[in-house]
Image (spheres, grey):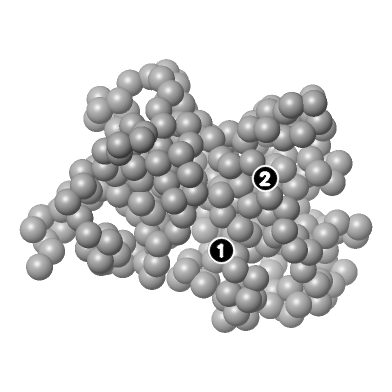
């Protein structure tokens, strides 16, 4: 069996930036075992598998090299960008079925893809000493008066506020310990951020998910959607600027990425989270499967 797989760089700030995802356009006949084999062979942080759906326009499955995840922001952006480039879809709003629920995806004329995420869920507050040990830092590296907390808009992450960009970029974590903590709290990984930025952005981020064989990821849509909700909850952004947030990521990996987030409200409660960006199709290959 021959499978055509595309490599698409999502959230790319430059030609060499963004986060590469594998995309398989016609996965309707593929078993979960085959999908996992493809994702493992490709080695990207996530690979998206697209098929038609009964209750939505498309169904997407997302696999890391060692397991399936419910939702992946950058692989969603990659998948719908590829379908738009191939003229499978045009400008408009589409429904995507995922294991995190059925979500709206908006394809804009200028090449931006916007994806809905689930309403934010705020979970456990994590002991700072526990996280500091895994990052091999002292607790004073964290921003005072802000919690280290689990938040989800589709995937659970631990959000870790760091005082400065210098502190953030100098972190050399213990990935085995992060994987242990991630499993303990049933999270995908850590999303670290500082309010110091390279450009005029909302925050500068790093993301670690070694439990899923992703030591560091250069752009994570779901994590930055949840981070936006965290920032609003703790008064670091307000309703007036929450509709146009920009997050920097991947700079520590020489893969500059830009993730856009928009929060929409009903009274003072977040009712809708949209994450978006551009993507570049950079490769096409055939895999021979036994």
Q: Would residue 250 be seen by someone viewing this image from the given angle?
A: no
Residue at left offset 63%, top offset 76%: 184
| Residue 212: % across, % down | 47, 69
Pair 2/1: label in front? 2
Q: CA distance from mark 2 to mark 1?
A: 16 Å
- Residue placed most toward the observer, 226 or 4: 226
Residue at left offset 75%, top offset 47%: 230
Q: Earlier in the sequence, mark 2 or mark 1?
A: 2
Picture layout, residue 190 above or below residue 248: below
Q: Tell whether 187 sits left or right of 10.
A: right
| Residue 215: % across, % down | 52, 69
- Residue placed most toward the observer, 33 or 208: 33
Residue 32's image quarter?
bottom left
Residue 138's image quarter?
bottom right
Residue assigned mark 2: 120
Q: Secondary structure at mark 2?
A: loop
| Residue 55: % across, % down | 36, 35
- Name the quadrant of the N terminus: bottom left
Residue assigned mark 1: 188
Picture layout, residue 209 above or below residue 84: below
Residue at left offset 49%, top offset 49%: 100
Q: Tell whether 82 sits left or right of 155.
A: left
């Amino acid at each position: 069996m021959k499978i055509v797989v595309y490599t698409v760089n999502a959230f790319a700030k430059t030609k060499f930036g963004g986060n590469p995802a594998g995309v398989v356009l016609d996965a309707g006949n593929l078993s979960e075992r085959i999908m996992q084999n493809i994702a493992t062979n490709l080695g990207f942080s996530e690979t998206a598998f697209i098929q038609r759906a009964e209750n939505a326009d498309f169904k997407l499955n997302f696999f890391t090299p060692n397991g399936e995840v419910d939702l992946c922001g950058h692989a969603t952006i990659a998948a719908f960008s590829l379908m738009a480039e191939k003229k499978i879809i045009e400008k408009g709003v589409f429904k995507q079925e995922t294991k995190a629920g059925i979500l709206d995806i908006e394809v804009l004329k200028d090449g931006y893809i916007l994806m809905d995420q689930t309403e934010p869920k705020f979970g456990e507050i994590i002991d700072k000493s526990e996280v500091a040990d895994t990052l091999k830092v002292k607790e004073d590296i964290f921003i005072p008066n802000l919690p280290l907390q689990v938040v989800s808009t589709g995937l659970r992450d631990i959000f870790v506020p760091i005082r400065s960009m210098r502190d953030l970029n100098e972190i050399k974590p213990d990935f085995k310990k992060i994987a242990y903590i991630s499993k303990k709290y049933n999270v995908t990984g850590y999303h670290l951020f500082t309010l110091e930025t390279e450009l005029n952005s909302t925050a500068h981020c790093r993301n670690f998910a070694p439990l899923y064989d992703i030591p560091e990821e250069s752009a994570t849509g779901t994590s930055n959607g949840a981070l936006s909700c965290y920032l609003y909850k703790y008064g670091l952004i307000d309703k007036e600027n929450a509709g146009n947030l920009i997050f920097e990521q991947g700079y520590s990996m020489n893969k500059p990425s830009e993730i856009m987030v928009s929060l929409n409200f009903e009274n003072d409660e977040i009712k809708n989270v949209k994450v978006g960006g551009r993507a570049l199709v950079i490769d096409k290959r055939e895999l021979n499967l036994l």
